[in-house]
Amino acid sequence: MTKKTELGLLMEFAVVDIETTGGMPHTHGITEIAIVIHNGVEVTGKYVTLVNPRQKIPPFIVNMTGISDAMVAEAPLFEEVAPMIFNLLKDRIFVAHNVSFDYSFVHYMLGQAGFEWSAPKLCTIKLSRRVFPGLEKYGLGSLTRDLGIRIEGRHRAWGDAAATAKVLTMAIEKEGMGPIDILLGKKEQRVRKKIAPPSDQSDAI
């Protein structure tokens, strides 16, 4: 059953992690993407694939991720898996650890493949700072160690996405949907609407 927020809205999540050839969506490529579907209570689906980035993977990234040019040589191009990725992300909250990085790549690559897509973004770093305050660090490695989450394959898309999904589950179990509503701006929007005078035309837009 899909979880409801405190505002009564149905909410499903797509927890995403990508591996890339670098840090710039316009010049670098995705080498692996994993998507974990989460209904607010538990994981309900998953998808992972290597991707041919059409460019060489720098040696330091090969050393970090273990993904080599040979591994992605026969992998699908992003445009070949774009329809599947679009359908998995559509109408769901986009969740990632340091969400702007993953979102920027996926948004750009889907656009290049001909898909108009955008989604609300939820960063599990910001969520964890609210729900698990006082930790020394909030990078995925440090956070998961502190929370007792074991990552099966660090710096690989599936391992990191699955761990991020566990962080999301633990945050919801601890504090409910309230912190997520706040980070998505939903509570603030409701407060503004409640205090706006009746003559304020913004509510009618």
Image (tube, grey):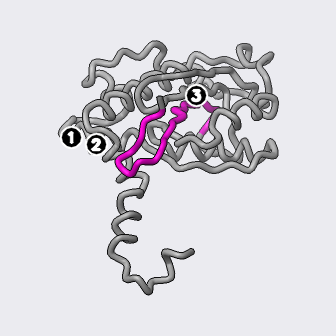
Type of amino acid at the residue the image marks with label 2:
Arg
Compared to residue 101, the image places residue 151 above or below, namely above
Compared to residue 3, the image places residue 121 above or below, namely below
Image location of residue 102, percent across then percent down: 56, 40
Q: Quadrant of residue 76?
A: top right
Q: Is residue 9 magenta?
A: yes
Magenta residues, start to end: 2-22
Q: Quadrant of residue 110?
A: top right
Q: Residue at x 37, y 40 (%)?
A: 125
Type of amino acid at the residue the image marks with label 1:
Pro
Q: Are marks 1 and 2 in contact (CB under 8 Å)?
A: yes
Q: Residue at x 28, y 42 (%)?
A: 129
Q: Earlier in the sequence, mark 2 or mark 3?
A: 3
Q: Dot 3 corresponds to which residue? A: 35
Q: Dot 1 corresponds to which residue? A: 133
* Dot 2 alpha-carbon crowd within 10 angstroms: few under 14, some 14 to 19, many 20 or more: some
Q: Dot 2 corresponds to which residue? A: 129
Q: Earlier in the sequence, mark 1 or mark 3?
A: 3
